[in-house]
Amino acid sequence: GAGVSQSPSNKVTEKGKDVELRCDPISGHTALYWYRQSLGQGLEFLIYFQGNSAPDKSGLPSDRFSAERTGGSVSTLTIQRTQQEDSAVYLCASSVIPGSGNTIYFGEGSWLTVV
Amino acid sequence: KNEVEQSPQNLTAQEGEFITINCSYSVGISALHWLQQHPGGGIVSLFMLSSGKKKHGRLIATINIQEKHSSLHITASHPRDSAVYICAVRNTGNQFYFGTGTSLTVIP
């Protein structure tokens, strides 16, 4: 596709259920980032994948959160045993690496509501 | 302390006014980005800077690497410019740090 694609665009889930959020980055982009944004808050880093390197997981808020990137392309963010404080928009972004002369492209986000 | 600080946090302007949003950062960077987030949540990249100044339509972005400071200017502001403007810096490890955003409302 032409841009970063995320699915689902909206998800309402019951507390305690697991959810999976998908990100399909721009073809050829080796860097993939997951962020989340709670209502009225700034962007919070979650995890960063770069090519075949070990991901930077330093932003994951708890062990209920995990992410993988298969084949260097599509990524899935999984939240287990969801809590109400997990409600946020989860944004995926991708960028071409290496070099600093590359912009970052965001998906439209997956809006998660935990009830 | 945040690596990226933006000011002001909120800004209301009359249509036609000249607007400036400031960004200061504390880390070594390879590039600085200005992003625009509309009420629906979508984010688009407006500018990417590593030095000097860039202009796109009514938008101008400048960066001073020595002072670790960047500004985003909007000339002849319009209600459709109403959005959250986010400053983001990419460090040499390709990690991004984001400011908390400036919420701009332009009143007709």
Image (cartoon, coloured by chain):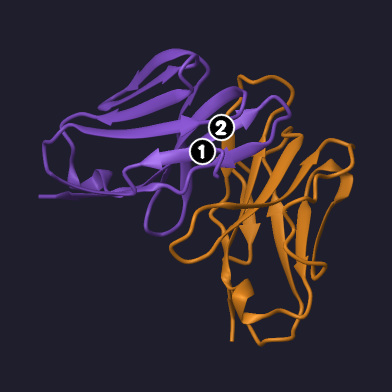
Chain colours: A orange, B purple
Specify the label residue B89 is tagged with: 2
Q: Mark 1 falls within which chain?
A: B
Rendered-image quadrant of the N terminus of chain B: top right
Location of residue A101 (image quadrant): top right
Q: Which mark is residue A80?
A: none
Q: Is residue A20 above or below residue B62?
A: below
Q: Is residue B78 left or right of residue B55?
A: left
Does the CB distance between marks 1 and 2 fall below 8 Å?
yes
Q: Which residue is denoted by mark 1 in the rendering?
A: B4
Is B53 situated above or below A1? above
Q: Amino acid at mark 2?
A: Val
Q: Is residue A52 left or right of residue B41?
A: right
Where residue B76 sits, quadrant-wise, is top left
Residue A17 in sight in this render: yes
Q: Foreground residue, B50 or A32?
A: B50
Q: Position of residue B98 (x, y in %)?
A: 54, 42
Relative side of B61 to A11, left or right: left
